Image (cartoon, rainbow, N blue to C red):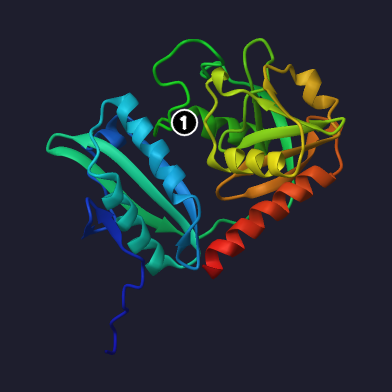
């Protein structure tokens, strides 16, 4: 039809129904940042780690007191959107409106992913960092401090932040987990610090255990990571990538990071071919 441009955007689903790609300004997720979310990659329409992401979404919603529809329904909605998107990022947003729970499922193109990262150590006073808190480790929509940390780091000439507690304990990145290697042993911040229970981190540590690598989780000062042999960041969007600097300290991509990246990619390929 002349003069008519077809809308080729993948669908936006709200509680399983196609809706316009918009959200009311009265929705608590907009007005208050009240809600939770998940983001996972679609590889040709196949969703990697869907079960783990849905389980974490359920934990987050429970911590916020938001009732969810049956989780298998949400999984089917995610698969439907992924089938339309193909390759990209599938996002699931949950909020509690006046008429009940809203679950939005939508997609976005895969962002540009750089091959290696430079991190800027930055204090994160908003982070629980081990202090008792009901929402510690919950993937809430209130990500403004994390986004601001990334912007501050980029303004300083880095790619992203390395978040630290008030006393200098290493935590995580704004949207990624961090691990490092000291004399052949993988180290990472422990979950009792209130860091996100990253799906990619969990899968990478499982692969490391299967490869016979020693793993230590704990509370580590910045000086510990600055003396590491190699460092990696991990997320569902980025997968596993090397860190080549933390502040002014330089690092070379190492064999453990490469091993974990290959193992993760192999798992992705197995999913695609299944």
Residue 254 occupies quadrant: top right
- How many marks can you see? 1
Relative to residue 55, is residue 178 drawn left or right?
right
* Front one among 65 and 152: 65
Considering every residue shown, the one lying at the far left of the view is 99
Relative to residue 90, is residue 248 drawn left or right?
right
Considering every residue shown, the one lying at the far bottom of the view is 2
The residue at 51%/67% (across/down) is: 274
x then y, percent, for residue 166: 62, 12
Relative to residue 191, is residue 133 drawn left or right?
left
x then y, percent, for residue 271: 54, 62
Local SS, label 1: helix
Check the image and report above or below for 91 versus 194: below
Q: Quadrant of the N terminus?
A: bottom left
x then y, percent, for residue 3: 29, 85
The residue at 34%/36% (across/down) is: 58
Is any part of residue 252 visible from this angle?
yes
x then y, percent, for residue 241: 71, 47
Check the image and report above or below for 21 versus 145: below
Is any part of residue 159 visible from this angle?
no
Residue 134 occupies quadrant: top left
The residue at 22%/50% (across/down) is: 15
* Front one among 221 and 209: 209
Residue on which disc 1 sits: 144
Check the image and report above or below for 186 versus 104: above
Check the image and report above or below for 113 versus 211: below
Mark 1 surroundings: few (<14), some (14-19) or many (≥20) residues within 10 A: few
Residue 31 occupies quadrant: top left
The residue at 25%/33% (across/down) is: 28
* Front one among 69 and 271: 271
């Amino acid at each position: 039809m002349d003069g008519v441009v077809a809308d080729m955007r993948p669908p936006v689903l709200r509680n399983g129904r196609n809706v316009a790609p918009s959200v009311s300004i009265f929705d608590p997720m907009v007005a208050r940042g009240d809600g939770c979310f998940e983001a996972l990659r679609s590889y040709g329409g196949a969703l990697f780690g869907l079960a783990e992401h849905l389980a974490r979404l359920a934990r987050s919603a429970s911590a916020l007191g938001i009732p969810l529809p049956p989780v298998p329904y949400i999984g089917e909605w995610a698969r439907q959107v992924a089938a339309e998107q193909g390759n990209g990022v599938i996002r699931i947003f949950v909020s509690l409106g006046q008429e009940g729970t809203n679950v939005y499922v939508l997609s976005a193109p895969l962002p540009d992913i750089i091959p290696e990262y430079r991190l800027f150590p930055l204090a994160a006073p908003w982070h629980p960092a081990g202090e008792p808190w009901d929402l510690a480790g919950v993937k809430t929509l209130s990500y403004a401090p994390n986004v601001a940390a990334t912007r501050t780091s980029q303004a300083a000439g880095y790619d992203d932040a390395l978040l630290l507690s008030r006393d200098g304990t290493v935590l995580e990145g704004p949207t990624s987990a961090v691990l490092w290697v000291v004399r052949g042993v993988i180290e990472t911040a422990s979950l009792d610090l209130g860091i996100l229970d990253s799906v990619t981190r969990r899968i990478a540590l499982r692969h490391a255990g299967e490869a016979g690598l020693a793993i230590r989780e704990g509370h580590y000062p910045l000086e510990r990571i600055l003396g590491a042999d190699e460092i990696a960041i991990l997320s569902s969007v980025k997968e596993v990538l090397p860190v080549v600097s933390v502040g002014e300290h330089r690092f070379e991509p190492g064999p453990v990071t490469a091993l974990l990246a290959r193992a993760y990619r192999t798992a992705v390929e197995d999913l695609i071919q299944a």
